[in-house]
Image (cartoon, helix red, strand yellow):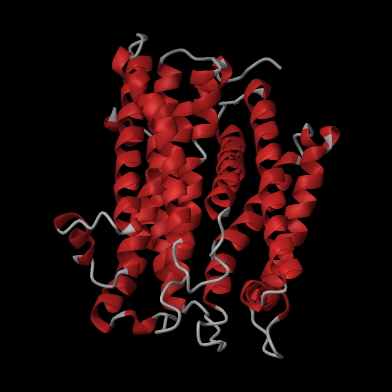
């Protein structure tokens, strides 16, 4: 099926060329990072995680979000979701690849990644995080490719695929649970030291992942004749609404615990994120208030049925939700965890131009993978005679 990539429109190849240019530029910058070390980033002794790990954390949620299609389709036999499951699985593949690459560039020397597998340490959460991510990548690749082959020849997938699908559902929960443990297991960082960290991660994943998928499906509808249909959009939007509501509720629980308890260790990071600390302001303050406004605005629009079912408003709503969760769960989470430091000092982290450049290259590579896989999936569906323009 890979030969279908060679049969595209000029616009498709122009898009791939654009992505390859960004990847090439980012690779050159990465070579400089290998030579000069992580000192070209904004990281320091007191702030050892930054832009790279922030994107890794968020993209794990995007990958796990695909389960919001698989679970209703296979556990509750909701057949309309099966039309678009392949797109969710291929999006998860791109997200997991980006996750792994962000870990690689954060480690400085890429060969250090091999130490996790050549010298496994079961007491390390990072070891388990890498293991479950690799397993989830393989599951989605095998399930997605096998089911697409079956659709191409108009036959039922092998019976063993069903068992891998059930395994992937539980595996999707595990990848973000383990990521939550990666943060919550660090006692010196009060902002992360909470029992609901994994629950917050899952709630955020189950709204942001499907939101991005829907946005891309809307874009696909504009670029091609493929229409996911209201039978997909309406239930998935409702799932996003519930997940976003739970996500906001869990964050409000953190606010209550921090400020009602009066424990400075819990409240100081939140105060710093939104208003600075002891007269020290930070660039992240405006971003966090933007996240609050976007989160509540998107939630209000999603809760209101006439706005949630409005196809003109919905993409803007999902866009605000995606931005709000990205700010809170990526740089907001990292900066809040490292500020103040365990020595009660303030060290403001700002990602460097080179970090952002390498990050853009990884995003471009993920977009390249998803573009190629989605192109193959669309061609197979068209060849199978699937109706792209659905009657409403």
Residue at the spot x=42%, y=66% of the render? 52
Residue 176 visible in the displayed image: yes
Side of 192 relative to 20 (left or right):
right
Residue 260 placed where, x, y %?
A: 76, 67
Q: Mark yes or no: residue 18 visible.
A: no
Residue 343, position in %: x, y?
51, 87
What residue is at 42 percent from the left and 14 percent from the top?
Answer: 384
Q: Residue furthest top?
A: 155
Q: Please tell me which residue lies in front, 149 or 372.
A: 149
In the figure, is residue 297 to the left or right of 348? right
Could you tell me which residue is drawn at 39 percent across and 32 percent down? Answer: 168
Q: What is the quadrant of the N terminus in the image?
A: top left
Query: Is 279 rendered above or below residue 231?
Result: below
The part of the image, by quadrant, that contains residue 246 is top right
Tell me which residue sits at (68%, 73%) in the image.
Answer: 267
Across and down, in percent, residue 388 comes to 56, 20
Q: Of residues 78 and 268, which is closer to you in this image?
A: 268
Describe residue 30's horizontal placement relative to residue 178 as left or right. left
Residue closest to the far left: 118
Residue 144 in the image: state x and y as whole percent: 36, 28
Q: Quadrant of the C terminus?
A: top right
Where 390 sits versus 36, above or below?
A: above
Q: How many marks?
A: 0
Front residue of this view, candidates 11 and 229 = 229
């Amino acid at each position: 099926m890979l030969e279908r990539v060679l049969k595209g429109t000029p616009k498709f190849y122009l898009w791939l060329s654009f992505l390859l240019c960004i990847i090439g530029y980012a690779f050159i910058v990465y070579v400089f990072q290998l030579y000069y070390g992580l000192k070209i980033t904004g990281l320091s002794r007191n702030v050892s995680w930054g832009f790279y790990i922030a994107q890794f954390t968020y993209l794990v949620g995007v990958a796990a979000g695909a389960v919001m299609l698989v679970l209703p389709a296979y556990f509750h036999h909701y057949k309309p979701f099966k039309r678009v499951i392949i797109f969710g699985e291929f999006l998860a593949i791109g997200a997991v690849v980006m996750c792994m690459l962000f870990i690689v560039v954060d480690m400085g020397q890429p060969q250090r990644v091999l130490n996790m597998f050549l010298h496994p340490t079961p007491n390390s959460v990072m070891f388990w995080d890498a293991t479950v991510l690799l397993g989830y990548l393989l599951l989605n690749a095998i399930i997605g490719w096998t089911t697409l082959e079956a659709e191409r020849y108009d036959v039922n997938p092998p019976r063993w695929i069903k068992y891998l699908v059930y395994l992937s559902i539980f595996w999707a929960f595990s990848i973000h649970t383990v990521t939550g443990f990666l943060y919550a297991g660090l006692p010196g960082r009060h902002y992360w030291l909470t029992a609901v960290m994994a629950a917050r991660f899952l709630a955020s994943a189950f709204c942001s992942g499907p939101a991005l998928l829907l946005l891309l499906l809307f874009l696909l509808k504009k670029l091609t004749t493929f229409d996911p249909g209201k039978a997909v959009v309406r239930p998935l939007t409702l799932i996003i609404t519930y997940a976003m509501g739970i996500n906001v509720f869990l964050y409000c629980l953190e606010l209550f615990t921090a400020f009602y308890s009066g424990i400075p260790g819990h409240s100081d990071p939140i105060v710093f994120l939104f208003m600075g600390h002891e007269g020290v302001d930070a660039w992240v303050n405006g971003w966090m208030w933007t996240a609050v406004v976007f989160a509540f605005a998107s939630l209000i629009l999603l809760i209101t049925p006439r706005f949630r079912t409005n196809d003109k408003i919905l993409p803007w709503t999902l866009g605000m939700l995606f931005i709000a969760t990205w700010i809170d769960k990526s740089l907001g989470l990292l900066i809040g965890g490292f500020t103040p430091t365990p020595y009660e000092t303030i060290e403001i982290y700002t990602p460097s131009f080179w970090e952002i450049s390498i990050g853009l290259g990884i995003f471009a590579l993920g977009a390249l993978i998803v573009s190629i896989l989605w192109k193959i999936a669309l061609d197979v569906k068209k060849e199978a005679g699937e109706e792209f323009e659905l009657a409403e």
